[in-house]
Image (tube, rainbow, N blue to C red):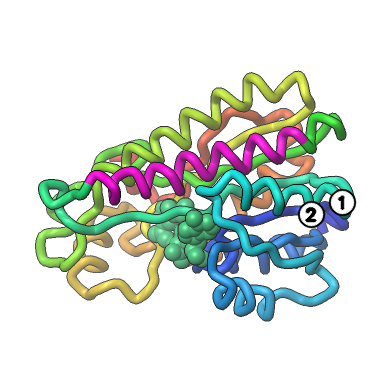
Amino acid sequence: MRLKNKSVVITGAGGQLGTRFAQSFATEGAKLWLADISPELLAKAAGQVPTENLLGTLIMDVTQPKSVESAFAKIREHGPLDVLVNNAGIGVFTPFWERDYYEFMQVMSVNVGGTFLCTREALRLMKDQGRGAIINIGSIYGVVSSDPSIYTDCARMNSEVYSASKAAVIHMTKYFAVHAAPLGVRVNCVSPGGVFNNQGEDFVQNYTQLTPFNRMAKDKEICGAVIFLASSEADYVSGQNIVVDGGFTAW
Ligand SMILES: NC(=O)c1ccc[n+]([C@@H]2O[C@H](COP(=O)([O-])OP(=O)(O)OC[C@H]3O[C@@H](n4cnc5c(N)ncnc54)[C@H](O)[C@@H]3O)[C@@H](O)[C@H]2O)c1
Protein backbone atom coordinates (compact mmCIF):
# COMPACT_ATOMS: atom_id res chain seq x y z
CA MET A 1 0.00 0.00 0.00
CA ARG A 2 2.71 2.47 -1.02
CA LEU A 3 0.17 4.84 -2.59
CA LYS A 4 -2.74 4.65 -0.18
CA ASN A 5 -5.36 7.27 -1.11
CA LYS A 6 -3.03 9.01 -3.57
CA SER A 7 -4.97 10.34 -6.56
CA VAL A 8 -3.58 9.25 -9.91
CA VAL A 9 -4.58 9.98 -13.49
CA ILE A 10 -3.52 7.56 -16.21
CA THR A 11 -3.89 8.53 -19.89
CA GLY A 12 -4.37 5.81 -22.47
CA ALA A 13 -5.81 3.78 -19.61
CA GLY A 14 -7.86 1.65 -21.99
CA GLY A 15 -4.76 0.10 -23.59
CA GLN A 16 -2.63 -2.89 -22.68
CA LEU A 17 -0.16 -1.12 -20.41
CA GLY A 18 -2.57 1.56 -19.16
CA THR A 19 -4.96 -1.04 -17.80
CA ARG A 20 -2.10 -2.94 -16.16
CA PHE A 21 -0.82 0.27 -14.56
CA ALA A 22 -4.31 0.98 -13.25
CA GLN A 23 -4.54 -2.45 -11.63
CA SER A 24 -1.10 -2.06 -10.14
CA PHE A 25 -1.86 1.41 -8.70
CA ALA A 26 -5.10 0.03 -7.26
CA THR A 27 -3.18 -2.76 -5.52
CA GLU A 28 -1.04 -0.05 -3.91
CA GLY A 29 -4.16 1.70 -2.57
CA ALA A 30 -4.33 4.59 -5.07
CA LYS A 31 -7.52 6.30 -6.22
CA LEU A 32 -7.73 6.48 -9.98
CA TRP A 33 -8.87 8.69 -12.80
CA LEU A 34 -8.79 6.60 -15.96
CA ALA A 35 -8.55 8.64 -19.17
CA ASP A 36 -8.73 7.53 -22.79
CA ILE A 37 -10.01 8.69 -26.17
CA SER A 38 -12.04 5.49 -26.54
CA PRO A 39 -15.17 5.22 -24.38
CA GLU A 40 -15.36 1.47 -25.06
CA LEU A 41 -11.78 0.76 -23.96
CA LEU A 42 -12.23 3.07 -21.00
CA ALA A 43 -15.31 1.18 -19.81
CA LYS A 44 -13.47 -2.10 -20.21
CA ALA A 45 -10.49 -0.83 -18.19
CA ALA A 46 -12.74 0.58 -15.47
CA GLY A 47 -14.31 -2.87 -15.14
CA GLN A 48 -10.89 -4.29 -14.29
CA VAL A 49 -10.25 -2.01 -11.32
CA PRO A 50 -12.01 -2.36 -7.93
CA THR A 51 -14.74 0.32 -7.69
CA GLU A 52 -13.37 1.61 -4.39
CA ASN A 53 -10.17 2.57 -6.24
CA LEU A 54 -11.97 4.43 -9.02
CA LEU A 55 -12.48 8.20 -8.85
CA GLY A 56 -13.89 8.34 -12.36
CA THR A 57 -13.37 7.91 -16.07
CA LEU A 58 -12.47 10.76 -18.41
CA ILE A 59 -13.01 10.65 -22.14
CA MET A 60 -10.05 12.73 -23.20
CA ASP A 61 -8.24 13.22 -26.49
CA VAL A 62 -4.72 14.20 -25.46
CA THR A 63 -4.18 16.03 -28.77
CA GLN A 64 -7.03 18.48 -28.12
CA PRO A 65 -6.29 21.33 -25.68
CA LYS A 66 -9.97 21.82 -24.80
CA SER A 67 -10.50 18.14 -24.13
CA VAL A 68 -7.44 17.99 -21.87
CA GLU A 69 -8.36 21.23 -20.08
CA SER A 70 -11.90 20.10 -19.32
CA ALA A 71 -10.72 16.71 -18.03
CA PHE A 72 -8.26 18.38 -15.67
CA ALA A 73 -10.91 20.90 -14.59
CA LYS A 74 -13.00 17.92 -13.47
CA ILE A 75 -10.03 16.52 -11.55
CA ARG A 76 -9.42 19.92 -9.91
CA GLU A 77 -13.07 20.17 -8.81
CA HIS A 78 -12.72 16.85 -7.05
CA GLY A 79 -9.52 17.54 -5.11
CA PRO A 80 -5.73 17.24 -5.24
CA LEU A 81 -3.82 15.29 -7.87
CA ASP A 82 -0.75 13.38 -6.72
CA VAL A 83 0.36 11.51 -9.85
CA LEU A 84 0.02 11.84 -13.63
CA VAL A 85 1.02 8.92 -15.86
CA ASN A 86 1.42 10.11 -19.47
CA ASN A 87 0.86 6.74 -21.08
CA ALA A 88 -1.32 7.47 -24.16
CA GLY A 89 0.75 6.76 -27.23
CA ILE A 90 0.46 5.55 -30.80
CA GLY A 91 2.76 4.24 -33.49
CA VAL A 92 2.61 3.71 -37.25
CA PHE A 93 3.93 0.61 -38.89
CA THR A 94 4.34 1.26 -42.61
CA PRO A 95 7.79 1.85 -44.18
CA PHE A 96 9.09 5.41 -43.89
CA TRP A 97 9.11 5.94 -47.65
CA GLU A 98 5.31 5.56 -47.59
CA ARG A 99 4.88 7.99 -44.69
CA ASP A 100 2.22 10.59 -45.15
CA TYR A 101 2.99 13.91 -43.47
CA TYR A 102 -0.38 13.94 -41.66
CA GLU A 103 0.36 10.48 -40.26
CA PHE A 104 3.79 11.71 -39.10
CA MET A 105 2.28 14.72 -37.34
CA GLN A 106 -0.47 12.63 -35.74
CA VAL A 107 2.11 10.48 -33.96
CA MET A 108 3.96 13.59 -32.81
CA SER A 109 0.68 15.13 -31.73
CA VAL A 110 -0.37 12.20 -29.51
CA ASN A 111 3.03 11.18 -28.12
CA VAL A 112 4.70 14.58 -27.72
CA GLY A 113 1.83 17.10 -27.87
CA GLY A 114 -0.34 14.95 -25.59
CA THR A 115 2.44 14.53 -23.05
CA PHE A 116 2.99 18.28 -23.11
CA LEU A 117 -0.69 19.23 -22.72
CA CYS A 118 -1.36 16.81 -19.86
CA THR A 119 1.87 17.81 -18.12
CA ARG A 120 0.98 21.51 -18.43
CA GLU A 121 -2.48 20.96 -16.94
CA ALA A 122 -1.15 18.70 -14.17
CA LEU A 123 1.53 21.25 -13.27
CA ARG A 124 -1.06 24.01 -13.05
CA LEU A 125 -2.74 21.87 -10.39
CA MET A 126 0.38 20.55 -8.71
CA LYS A 127 2.01 23.98 -8.35
CA ASP A 128 -0.89 25.07 -6.15
CA GLN A 129 -0.42 21.93 -4.05
CA GLY A 130 3.39 22.19 -3.90
CA ARG A 131 3.77 18.48 -4.63
CA GLY A 132 3.25 15.83 -7.29
CA ALA A 133 4.88 13.22 -9.49
CA ILE A 134 4.66 12.87 -13.25
CA ILE A 135 5.69 9.70 -15.04
CA ASN A 136 6.04 9.69 -18.81
CA ILE A 137 6.04 6.48 -20.80
CA GLY A 138 8.87 6.52 -23.33
CA SER A 139 10.27 3.54 -25.20
CA ILE A 140 13.55 1.78 -25.90
CA TYR A 141 13.14 3.28 -29.38
CA GLY A 142 13.54 6.73 -27.88
CA VAL A 143 17.00 5.54 -26.77
CA VAL A 144 18.19 3.34 -29.65
CA SER A 145 17.02 2.89 -33.23
CA SER A 146 14.91 -0.12 -34.04
CA ASP A 147 16.91 -2.86 -35.74
CA PRO A 148 15.40 -3.48 -39.20
CA SER A 149 16.36 -7.16 -38.99
CA ILE A 150 13.56 -7.65 -36.46
CA TYR A 151 10.92 -6.44 -38.88
CA THR A 152 11.90 -7.99 -42.24
CA ASP A 153 9.41 -10.86 -42.19
CA CYS A 154 6.61 -8.87 -40.60
CA ALA A 155 3.79 -6.83 -41.98
CA ARG A 156 4.79 -4.00 -39.64
CA MET A 157 7.91 -1.91 -39.20
CA ASN A 158 8.87 0.41 -36.40
CA SER A 159 8.76 3.97 -37.61
CA GLU A 160 11.14 6.93 -37.63
CA VAL A 161 8.43 9.15 -36.14
CA TYR A 162 7.71 6.83 -33.20
CA SER A 163 11.42 6.85 -32.29
CA ALA A 164 11.66 10.62 -32.69
CA SER A 165 8.54 11.16 -30.58
CA LYS A 166 9.77 8.94 -27.76
CA ALA A 167 13.21 10.60 -27.78
CA ALA A 168 11.32 13.89 -27.41
CA VAL A 169 9.34 12.47 -24.48
CA ILE A 170 12.55 11.38 -22.74
CA HIS A 171 14.11 14.79 -23.25
CA MET A 172 10.96 16.70 -22.24
CA THR A 173 11.07 14.66 -19.03
CA LYS A 174 14.41 16.28 -18.21
CA TYR A 175 13.18 19.76 -19.09
CA PHE A 176 10.14 19.48 -16.82
CA ALA A 177 12.13 17.77 -14.04
CA VAL A 178 14.34 20.86 -13.90
CA HIS A 179 11.59 23.45 -14.30
CA ALA A 180 9.06 21.77 -12.01
CA ALA A 181 11.55 21.06 -9.22
CA PRO A 182 10.90 24.45 -7.54
CA LEU A 183 7.18 23.55 -7.52
CA GLY A 184 7.87 20.35 -5.56
CA VAL A 185 7.06 18.13 -8.54
CA ARG A 186 9.19 15.22 -9.73
CA VAL A 187 9.13 14.23 -13.41
CA ASN A 188 10.52 10.91 -14.63
CA CYS A 189 10.17 8.51 -17.54
CA VAL A 190 9.82 4.74 -17.86
CA SER A 191 10.91 3.29 -21.21
CA PRO A 192 9.60 -0.22 -21.81
CA GLY A 193 11.06 -2.73 -24.24
CA GLY A 194 8.75 -4.77 -26.43
CA VAL A 195 5.80 -6.11 -24.46
CA PHE A 196 4.31 -9.42 -25.56
CA ASN A 197 0.82 -8.99 -27.00
CA ASN A 198 0.37 -11.89 -29.41
CA GLN A 199 2.49 -10.25 -32.10
CA GLY A 200 3.39 -12.41 -35.11
CA GLU A 201 5.61 -15.44 -34.58
CA ASP A 202 8.47 -14.03 -36.70
CA PHE A 203 8.52 -10.75 -34.84
CA VAL A 204 8.51 -12.41 -31.43
CA GLN A 205 11.31 -14.77 -32.45
CA ASN A 206 13.47 -12.03 -33.98
CA TYR A 207 12.91 -9.68 -31.05
CA THR A 208 13.64 -12.45 -28.54
CA GLN A 209 16.97 -13.25 -30.20
CA LEU A 210 18.13 -9.66 -29.70
CA THR A 211 17.14 -9.59 -26.01
CA PRO A 212 19.62 -10.80 -23.37
CA PHE A 213 16.69 -12.17 -21.30
CA ASN A 214 15.68 -14.15 -24.40
CA ARG A 215 12.01 -13.15 -24.22
CA MET A 216 9.69 -10.17 -24.58
CA ALA A 217 8.39 -8.31 -21.50
CA LYS A 218 5.18 -9.26 -19.73
CA ASP A 219 3.00 -6.16 -19.31
CA LYS A 220 2.97 -6.50 -15.52
CA GLU A 221 6.78 -6.26 -15.50
CA ILE A 222 6.64 -2.59 -16.54
CA CYS A 223 4.53 -1.63 -13.51
CA GLY A 224 7.24 -1.85 -10.82
CA ALA A 225 9.26 1.07 -12.16
CA VAL A 226 6.13 3.23 -12.56
CA ILE A 227 4.92 2.51 -9.02
CA PHE A 228 8.40 3.16 -7.61
CA LEU A 229 8.62 6.56 -9.34
CA ALA A 230 5.14 7.49 -8.10
CA SER A 231 5.92 6.53 -4.52
CA SER A 232 7.79 8.33 -1.76
CA GLU A 233 10.63 5.81 -2.22
CA ALA A 234 11.56 8.00 -5.20
CA ASP A 235 11.36 11.31 -3.33
CA TYR A 236 14.88 12.29 -4.45
CA VAL A 237 14.54 10.94 -8.03
CA SER A 238 13.75 13.31 -10.88
CA GLY A 239 14.66 13.71 -14.55
CA GLN A 240 15.45 10.00 -14.97
CA ASN A 241 14.56 7.47 -17.63
CA ILE A 242 14.25 3.93 -16.27
CA VAL A 243 14.57 1.46 -19.13
CA VAL A 244 12.72 -1.82 -18.51
CA ASP A 245 13.77 -4.03 -21.39
CA GLY A 246 15.39 -7.31 -20.30
CA GLY A 247 18.73 -5.87 -21.36
CA PHE A 248 17.71 -5.06 -24.98
CA THR A 249 19.52 -1.71 -25.03
CA ALA A 250 22.55 -2.95 -23.07
CA TRP A 251 24.47 -4.32 -26.09
N1 LIG B 1 3.52 -2.23 -25.74
C1 LIG B 1 4.81 -2.04 -25.96
O1 LIG B 1 5.53 -2.95 -26.40
C2 LIG B 1 5.42 -0.71 -25.65
C3 LIG B 1 6.82 -0.61 -25.66
C4 LIG B 1 7.38 0.63 -25.40
C5 LIG B 1 6.59 1.72 -25.12
N2 LIG B 1 5.22 1.57 -25.13
C6 LIG B 1 4.43 2.76 -24.83
O2 LIG B 1 3.54 2.46 -23.78
C7 LIG B 1 2.35 3.23 -23.92
C8 LIG B 1 1.15 2.31 -23.88
O3 LIG B 1 1.29 1.36 -24.92
P1 LIG B 1 0.29 0.14 -25.13
O4 LIG B 1 1.09 -0.96 -25.70
O5 LIG B 1 -0.49 -0.10 -23.90
O6 LIG B 1 -0.61 0.71 -26.29
P2 LIG B 1 -2.16 0.49 -26.56
O7 LIG B 1 -2.35 0.78 -28.01
O8 LIG B 1 -2.60 -0.83 -26.04
O9 LIG B 1 -2.84 1.64 -25.70
C9 LIG B 1 -2.76 3.00 -26.03
C10 LIG B 1 -4.01 3.68 -25.50
O10 LIG B 1 -3.92 5.07 -25.82
C11 LIG B 1 -5.19 5.51 -26.26
N3 LIG B 1 -5.04 6.67 -27.12
C12 LIG B 1 -4.62 6.74 -28.40
N4 LIG B 1 -4.69 7.99 -28.87
C13 LIG B 1 -5.17 8.75 -27.85
C14 LIG B 1 -5.48 10.14 -27.72
N5 LIG B 1 -5.33 10.99 -28.75
N6 LIG B 1 -5.94 10.58 -26.53
C15 LIG B 1 -6.12 9.73 -25.49
N7 LIG B 1 -5.86 8.41 -25.57
C16 LIG B 1 -5.39 7.93 -26.73
C17 LIG B 1 -5.77 4.32 -27.02
O11 LIG B 1 -7.20 4.42 -27.11
C18 LIG B 1 -5.30 3.16 -26.15
O12 LIG B 1 -6.24 2.82 -25.17
C19 LIG B 1 2.49 4.01 -25.23
O13 LIG B 1 2.96 5.31 -24.96
C20 LIG B 1 3.53 3.21 -25.98
O14 LIG B 1 4.22 3.97 -26.93
C21 LIG B 1 4.62 0.39 -25.39
Query: x, y percentage for residue 106?
Result: 37, 49
Dominant secondary structure (helix, strand or loop) of the stretch shown in magenta: helix
Q: Which residue is mark 1?
A: 77
Q: Residue at x 40, y 41 (%)?
A: 166
In the image, taking residue 218 as reference, residue 205 lies left or right, namely left
* Residue 67 in view here: yes
Q: Residue at x 46, y 53 (%)?
A: 89
Query: x, y percentage for residue 228?
Result: 67, 47
Quadrant of residue 154 within the rendered picture = bottom left
Asked which secondary structure carries label 2, the reply is helix
Q: Observer-nearest residue: 133 or 211?
A: 133
Quadrant of residue 206 within the rendered picture = bottom left
Tell me if residue 42 comes above or below residue 107 in the rendering. Answer: below
Tell me if residue 192 comes above or below residue 198 in the rendering. Answer: above
Q: Which residue is mark 2?
A: 74
Segment tinted magenta in the rendering: 101-124
Asked which secondary structure carries label 1, the reply is helix
Q: Residue at x 80, y 59 (%)?
A: 30
Q: Are marks 2 and 1 in contact (CB under 8 Å)?
A: yes
Q: CA distance from mark 2 to mark 1?
A: 5 Å
| Amino acid carrying mark 2 in the image | Lys
Q: Is residue 180 magenta?
A: no
Query: x, y percentage for residue 20?
Result: 59, 67
Q: Observer-nearest residue: 117 or 197?
A: 117
Q: Is residue 111 magenta?
A: yes
Q: Observer-nearest residue: 101 or 197?
A: 101
| In the image, the residue with mark 2 has its CB under 8 Å from the nearest atom of ligand 1 | no
